[in-house]
Image: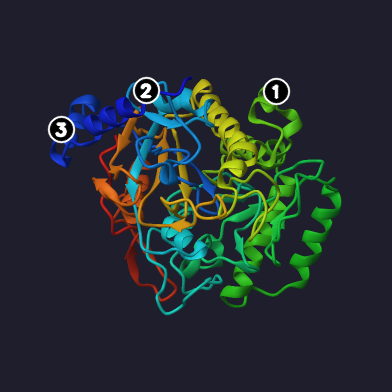
Amino acid sequence: MTAFNRRTALTASAGMLGAGLPRWLRAVEQSSGGQRTSAKNCIVIYCWGGMSHHEVLDPKPDAPVEVRGEFSPIATATPGIFIGEHTPLLARHTDKLAIIRSIHHDQSAHGRGMYWNMTGHAPPPSRPGNIPPSRHDWPSLASMLTKFRSAPRGVPRAVRIPYPMVDNGTLQAGEYGGWMGVEYDPIVMKTPSGKAWGGVSRSLGAEVLDLDGGVDTDRITARQSLLSSLESPARGSDYAGFEHYRQLATDMLLSSHVKTAYDLDREDSKLRGQYGDHIAGQSMLLARRLVEAGVPIVQIICSAGDLNGGAGDMWDTHGQNFNRLKNRLLPPFDRGFSTLLSDLSDRGMLDETLVVLLTEFGRTPKINGGAGRDHYPNVYSVALAGGGIRGGQVYGSSDSKGAFPRTLPCGPADLHATIFKALGVAPNARIRDLLDRQLAVSDGHPLPLF
């Protein structure tokens, strides 16, 4: 891949993305023939911290230097689509991607932006700043999808790896079951490593399953039998939730499905190496193996090291944006994400597995005094692949400085409606809250990406 002429790229992008929605819809209808099947599984890759759209999925080569930054765009496998130069492996797989460059919302705090993207709904205005999880929150995407997906015994319906999201010492609302109840909280599972990957993540008391150690199945069975004989029937929702997770954890330890998937040493060593010897790539490999084991929804926090919160190898690049992206963040992301796409495709799994790339917001158009970019929700980029999504396309565009949507603006609710549609769930399908009220899973409109 080589850098391209900035003027040529801008002209190509304008020609491809300037069409209005009716023209776009007609083109999609003609290319798809109106035929599609629903995806069975979903893998969500979340770039916690706010991935810069300027340096990854929406470069601005003709902008002033204080906006366009230090990187050049590169051509991709899809004529007319250009992405950042430090994602050369991903550039080979744009034929599988639908890149959305016009998504936006109005929340510039990490947790609140994540709440928008993971629930498809605005965070509660009555709770400013970081929002700790509560049973009054809107359920996460993974939690809502579990209502419509089943799994074999001993296999959870939704898994988060490798840790919960934390900001400034606070667990974040938006990735839990909320008012659907504790039974819909996705299990948190540590990625096996056998070594440290650059730090220690903070779980802040969250239950994180680590299946890496030896498991004495006879002892577990005996303890389970003893507990069952001593306990009375479930007493209220808190106890029922505790019992649900204890039983599920026990089933996973005793079941061969998840235990086998968790053992990454069983994977072909060459393929495992292609994912990369870092927590980002190995988490994506684990996600693929869990999907094969019957887990319908897997969410990955994609970082370069085993760190989260306000420091470390995540995407909050207020300072040294270009050095951090070039040297620490983009190489693991590029290798892991591109290998996941090719691996799913080679196994014939991509059509039935929807892959969702999310982040809470983008970064400011103007580079700050610390050679970084700050939080920016006014426009940013996400992507979808597989699951009936037509690859090799860009939906919408941002303006010449990557500051606001230029064409086809959309929001997190529309993205969620698209995800539900891809998975065969009507965007207005109903779920019940703790008061037994029926609410639609999404109030957005599916994007014409099929």
Question: Which of the two marks, 1 or 2, is nearer to us in this view?
Answer: 2
Q: Residues within 10 Å of mark 1 (few under 14, many from 20)?
A: few
Residue 425 visible to the viewer:
no
Q: Are marks 1 and 2 in contact (CB under 8 Å)?
A: no
Taking the image as shown, residue 364 lies to the left or right of residue 30, namely right
The x, y position of residue 449, in whole percent, is: 29, 37
The x, y position of residue 305, in whole percent, is: 69, 46
Going by the numbered disc 3, the residue's amino acid type is Arg
Residue denoted by label 1: 268
Of the pair 435 and 308, the residue shown nearer to us: 308
Residue denoted by label 2: 78
Residue 127 numbered tag: none
Establish if 167 lies above or below 379: below
Establish if 85 lies above or below 417: above
Going by the numbered disc 1, the residue's amino acid type is Asp
Marks 1/3: CA distance? 44 Å
Callout 1: helix, strand or loop?
A: loop
Query: Residue drawn 16% across and 40% down?
Result: 20
Query: Residue drawn 35% across and 33% down?
Result: 388
Residue denoted by label 3: 26
Callout 2: helix, strand or loop?
A: loop
Query: Residue drawn 30% across and 50% down?
Result: 426
Q: Residues within 10 Å of mark 2 (few under 14, many from 20)?
A: some
Of the pair 181 and 133, the residue shown nearer to us: 133
The x, y position of residue 199, in whole percent, is: 76, 51
Q: Earlier in the sequence, mark 1 or mark 2?
A: 2
Going by the numbered disc 2, the residue's amino acid type is Thr
